[in-house]
Amino acid sequence: MSDDSGKRNDAGHADDVLRRADRTADDRRIRDLMNALDAGECSGEPRPWDHEAFLARMTARYGG
């Protein structure tokens, strides 16, 4: 095996490792998103949103 051939194989292996790592990370993000969606759906009926009350809470908490 020549040096050039070995370098190509190493690069190919590195590409495979990176592709697998990306796929694993993507799978993890999808699983986390699906879990968050499930949690939201199981959290009960939606409540009305009061924008003014939210702003008042955030201003009281963080200043404004």
Image (cartoon, rainbow, N blue to C red):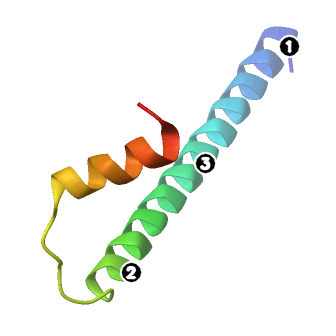
Looking at the rendered structure, the kind of residue marked 1 is Ser
Looking at the rendered structure, the kind of residue marked 2 is Ala
As rendered, which of 1 and 56 lies closer to the eye?
Answer: 56
Disc 3: CA contacts within 10 A as few (<14), some (14-19) or many (>=20): few
Q: State how far apart marks 3 and 2 are (Cα).
A: 28 Å
Q: Going 50% across and 48% down the picture, which residue do you hit?
A: 61
Query: Is 59 placed left or right of 27 in the picture?
Result: left
Give the structural element (helix, strand or loop) at label 2.
helix
Q: Closer to us: mark 3 or mark 1? A: 3
Give the structural element (helix, strand or loop) at label 1.
loop
Label annotation for residue 2: 1
As rendered, which of 21 and 53 lies closer to the eye?
Answer: 53
Q: State how far apart marks 1 and 2 are (Cα).
A: 55 Å
Q: Going 46% across and 68% down the picture, which residue do you hit?
A: 31
Residue located beneath label 3 in the image = 20
Q: Residue furthest left?
A: 48
Image quadrant holding the N terminus, namely top right
